[in-house]
Image: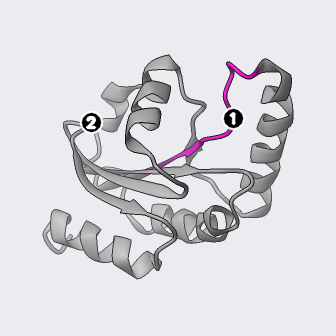
Amino acid sequence: MNASELRNSRLVVVNIWGTDCPPCIKELPELAALSNEYDPKDLRVIGIPRDVDPAGKSTFETRLAEARRIISVTGVTFTNLIPDAEMEDFIKASVIGTPTTFLLDQEGNVIETMIGGKPISVLKSLIGEHLGGN
């Protein structure tokens, strides 16, 4: 998946999560349900497991295996990406804790940021505001 594919959605939810973050893992099934609730033309959900970093080669395989296990047991079907160097720089500059969820418009601009575990109803409300009642 690349950035041009995301332009096919009116909104994109990007959830930065950690394999050792209980609130992150708790919200993954809710995000999976949210992803299934909308047409991909309106909303796409992307996950980024923050602690799966290819630069930390000694722990990369262990963290990747744990991320895959968590994705499987939580029923996540939306795309999860391993950050490249550019995305890693953005995360380091923008994320102060996990989970952090960004809502992006079709041009990739961050239009909302949620830090910490929040009820899914908060995110749904923001999505509804930006989709104009869907």
Q: Residue at x 46, y 49 (%)?
A: 96
Horizontal arrangement in the rendering, residue 12 relative to residue 130 (left or right): right
Residue 1 visible in the picture: no
Choose top left, top right, bottom left or bottom right for residue 76.
Answer: bottom right
- Could you say which disc has been placed on residue 1 in the image? none
Q: Is residue 133 left or right of residue 41?
A: left
Numbered circle sitting on residue 52: 1
**Residue that appears at 52% across and 70% down:** 117
Mark 2 sits on what residue? 7
The answer to whether residue 100 is left or right of residue 71 is: left
Which three-letter amino acid code belongs to the residue tagged 2?
Arg
Confirm whether residue 54 shows in the render: yes
Relative to 92, is 126 on the left or the right?
Answer: left
Residue 39 x %, y %: 36, 58
What kind of residue is marked 1? Val
| Near-viewer residue (133 or 74) | 74
Q: Is residue 52 above or below residue 34?
A: above
Q: Position of residue 17 (x, y in %)?
A: 59, 52
**Residue situated furthest left in the rendering:** 132
Residue 56, placed above or below residue 91? above
In what element is the residue under mark 2? loop
Q: For the magenta stretch, what is the residue range? A: 45-56
Give x and y (percent) for residue 5: 36, 31
